[in-house]
Image (spheres, rainbow, N blue to C red):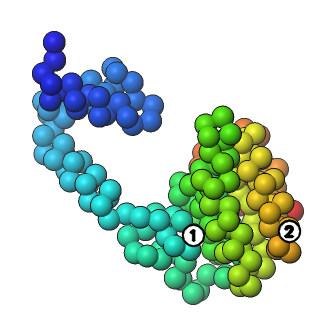
Amino acid sequence: MAEPALEGLIEALRRLPGVGQKSAQRMAFHLLQHDREGAQRIAHALTTAVNDIRHCERCHTFTEAAICRTCLDDTRDQRLLCVVETPADQAAMERTGSYRGLYFVLMGRLSPLDGIGVRDIGLQQLVSRAGDGSVDEVIVATSFTAEGEATAHVIAEALKLRGVKVTRLARGVPIGSELEYVDLGTIAHALVDRR
Ligand SMILES: [Zn+2]
């Protein structure tokens, strides 16, 4: 029988994606036995991040300010808006070094089975952002999974109704893949070949 505090720690660690009972237990034992200072740092970093990080009012990505640095960067091309699913996908796009426009981060994708609908991905906010007169083209870079494609379709339909030009990353990206895990050269090509 484990101590309640230990049990609680293991339960908490299990909330992390991909972490089951065994890994959670291993992490808990490691921290308590070998790295209590690290454990304090994790606890502190989590508290700070949860308290200070919110969503950018313009693009919904993570930021500590009301509007993120990317949105405020006036050297970027204000006429291009790239729609990605997650901040990780945004980071992947940034690492290619071949995109200099702005972003809209959905913070997910349509998934009716999980109860994630158009409201949860901020479709209305995206439509008003893209239709505010400053954007010439919206590049939809959702993943090439069934849900990502469905999301791309719904976004394209909504934006076309508003007369906004919509393109999709080209098909160089393997079907079924999440942008975050695709190599940078492939993303860069898909960006250039968008249609
Ligand atoms: Zn922003």
Dot 2 corresponds to which residue? 161
Q: Amino acid at mark 1?
A: Cys
Camera sees residue 26: no
Judge the density around disc 1: few (<14), some (14-19), many (≥20) Cα neighbours within 10 Å. Answer: many
| Dot 1: element | loop
Which of discs 2 and 1 lies nearer the camera? The answer is: 2
x and y, in percent, of residue 109 in the image = 65, 49
Judge the density around disc 2: few (<14), some (14-19), many (≥20) Cα neighbours within 10 Å. Answer: few
Left or right side of 126 for 57: left
Q: Residue at x 34, y 21 (%)?
A: 21
User: Height in image: 104 above or below 75?
Assistant: above
Q: Amino acid at mark 2?
A: Leu
Mark pair 2, 1: CA separation: 21 Å
Q: Residue at x 15, y 25 (%)?
A: 4
Q: Does mark 1 have its CB less than 8 Å from ligand 1? A: yes
Identify which residue, 121 or 76, lies in the foreground. Answer: 121
Q: Quadrant of the C terminus?
A: bottom right
User: Height in image: 13 above or below 38?
Assistant: above
Q: Residue at x 15, y 38 (%)?
A: 35
Q: Quadrant of the N terminus?
A: top left
Identify which residue, 61 or 163, lies in the foreground. Answer: 163
Left or right side of 122 for 176: right
x and y, in percent, of residue 161 in the image = 86, 68
Camera sees residue 43: yes
Identify which residue, 12 or 144, lies in the foreground. Answer: 12
